[in-house]
């Protein structure tokens, strides 16, 4: 009996020893080896701290930066939005190491290296595994899928976003936009003036458009899903301020339990939406689905030909893609509309130019046609400059699938590369001395010639994984702004506090109140002359 007890004790000690050794290797020995590897190549960074990495400094910088607002009309937002990059670049150079717990990330902001990662050597890199809460929020769809399954889903979904298909949706989108602006007019005072918090209004607008154009449904069907996702964003933001501990999401803490309930409710509502759409499809006389996201996914899942494991589109796949598109589709466009409206309110000379173009191109038409939209060149330049200064996604991450050489640097397998999109967009060496000024004219000859390097402008990413919904986002934004410019002139409210910050995407920390002045019906002809 004593021998048996002794053997159990020895076994337990051995198991604990092996576990302890693995912890030491993961949290101390491996990070030291990585630091030494990059140090020999001239790449350094803030020293790794056991277990927490640089999280303490990162969170401290973010809290300090977000505690103060910026001067109005100041577009030098990098120190506020990515303070760690702004601070450590001055110390360690453009490429440096930063530790998110025991996970190392190498910052890469050189356009030539970025092009390697996304295009010429893209096969050596993959999307990193998102934080579990992020994955739960945005779905296990195109945003996170990899390999053949990603390629298969992308092929199925791509027709939804062909420009010619999207242009057919202009009347549907315009209906939502006109309804919103009719409400603004009804809210205005006798003088024709009304103050609108545009970030909220544009969020509601894009949610409405997403549900109608991508899912063939009314806003009420998607409204509850969007509200639940908004609650999930808060959980994600809270999680990002702490060191990620693998498996902790399975511990039944109050936050985790609430997160599980939210995800379950979202799935339930999406299943209801999918089932109703499938039923409508079956009852359709022609038996055909329309070319929106949900229709194409259902058509793929109901294919009569026997699918292989790869070709099979399951109900769960549809749910995950819907979660992705509900979140990313609405957030990207609403952020673009918000910042563009803020910029035009801050810079009235460009607002006048954009309005004059809309009136010249559209004439007496209240709503631009699909041919009109293509001709709105000034508005296109303004949107590009807005995306440059205030990109919805301020950074993206890739991970090396194998040992690879990047611009002469030897990158070990599993290294995460942090591409600070915002920093590239605000790089003076690429954009010139007016880099922090709102100057849409820099895009007069197109995106390729706007900067000193063609990869200096990447608001929607680059290469094969370029954002599939960018055409929809730009079309919605251009259409909404054209209708708005025809009806209103606008300026920033005195209560506006300029405070760009990140909560998954770039947004105004204290909202974006804008004062709109209703224009006379015949104002357009005067402006256009």
Image (tube, helix red, strand yellow):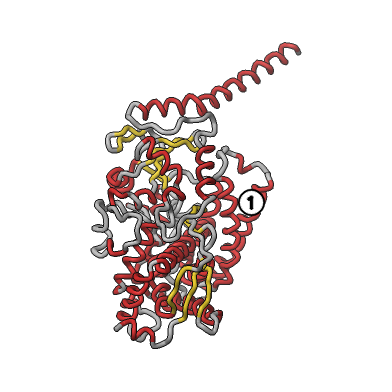
Which sits in the foreground, 68 or 298?
68
Q: Which residue is drawn at 44% across and 43% down?
A: 128
Mark 1 Cα shell of 10 Å, populated few (<14), some (14-19), many (≥20): some
Which sits in the foreground, 506 or 475?
506
Q: In which quarter of the image is residue 230?
A: bottom right
Which quarter of the rendering shows the C terminus?
bottom left
Q: Which residue is drawn at 38% across and 70% down?
A: 348
Query: Is residue 347 in view from this perspective?
Result: yes
Residue 315, x across and y down, in percent: 53, 59
Residue 307, x across and y down, in percent: 44, 56
Q: Residue at x 54, y 54 (%)?
A: 137
Residue 235, x across and y down, in percent: 60, 51
- The residue lying furthest to the top in this view is 3
Q: Mark 1 points at which residue?
A: 260
Q: Where 500 falls versus 378 (above or below)?
A: above
Give the side of residue 407 with respect to residue 127, left or right. left
Give the side of residue 290 with respect to residue 119, left or right. right
């Amino acid at each position: 009996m004593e021998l048996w007890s002794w053997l159990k004790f020895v076994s337990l000690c051995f198991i604990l020893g092996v576990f302890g050794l693995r912890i030491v290797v993961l949290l101390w020995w491996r990070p030291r080896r990585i630091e030494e590897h990059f140090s020999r190549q001239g790449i350094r960074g803030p020293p790794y701290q056991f277990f927490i990495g640089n999280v303490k400094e990162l969170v401290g910088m973010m809290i300090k930066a977000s505690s103060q607002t910026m001067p109005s009309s100041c577009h030098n937002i990098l120190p506020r939005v990515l303070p760690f990059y702004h601070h450590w670049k001055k110390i360690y150079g453009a490429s440096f190491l930063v530790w998110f717990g025991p996970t190392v990330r190498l910052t890469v902001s050189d356009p030539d290296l970025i092009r390697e990662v996304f295009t010429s050597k893209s096969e050596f890199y993959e999307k990193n595994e998102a934080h579990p809460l992020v994955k739960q929020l945005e779905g296990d769809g195109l945003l996170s899928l990899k390999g053949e399954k990603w390629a298969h889903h992308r092929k199925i979904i791509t027709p939804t976003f062909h420009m010619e298909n999207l242009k057919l949706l202009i009347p549907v989108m315009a209906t939502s936009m006109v309804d919103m602006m009719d409400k603004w007019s009804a809210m205005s005072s006798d003088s024709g003036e009304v103050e609108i918090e545009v970030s909220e209004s544009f969020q509601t607008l894009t949610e409405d458009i997403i549900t109608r154009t991508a899912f063939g449904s009314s806003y009420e069907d998607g409204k509850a899903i969007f509200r639940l996702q908004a609650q999930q964003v808060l959980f994600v933001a809270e999680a990002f301020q702490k060191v990620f501990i693998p498996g902790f999401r399975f511990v039944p803490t109050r936050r985790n339990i609430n997160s599980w309930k939210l995800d379950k409710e979202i799935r339930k509502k999406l299943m209801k939406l999918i089932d109703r759409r499938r039923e409508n499809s079956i009852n359709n006389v022609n038996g055909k689905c329309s070319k929106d996201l949900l229709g194409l996914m259902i058509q793929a899942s109901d294919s009569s030909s026997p699918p292989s494991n790869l070709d099979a589109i399951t109900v769960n796949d549809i749910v995950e893609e819907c979660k992705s598109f509900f979140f990313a589709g609405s957030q990207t466009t609403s952020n673009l509309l918000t910042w563009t409206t803020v910029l035009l309110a801050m810079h009235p000379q460009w607002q006048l130019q954009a309005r004059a173009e809309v009136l010249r191109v559209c004439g007496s038409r209240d709503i631009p046609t699909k041919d009109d939209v293509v001709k709105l060149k000034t508005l296109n330049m303004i949107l590009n400059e807005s995306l440059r200064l205030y990109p919805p996604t301020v950074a993206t991450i890739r991970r090396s699938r194998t040992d690879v050489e990047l611009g002469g640097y030897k990158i070990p397998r599993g290294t995460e590369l942090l591409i600070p999109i915002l920093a590239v967009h605000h790089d003076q060496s690429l954009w010139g001395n007016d880099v922090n000024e709102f100057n849409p004219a820099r895009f007069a000859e197109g995106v390729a010639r706007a900067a000193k390097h063609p990869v200096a402008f990447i608001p929607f990413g680059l290469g094969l994984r370029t954002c599939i919904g960018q055409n929809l986002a730009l079309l919605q934004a251009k259409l909404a702004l054209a209708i708005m410019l025809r009806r209103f002139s606008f300026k920033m409210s005195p209560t506006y506090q300029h405070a760009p910050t990140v909560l998954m995407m770039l947004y105004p920390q204290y909202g974006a109140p804008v004062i709109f002045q209703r224009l006379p019906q015949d104002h357009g002809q005067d402006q256009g002359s």
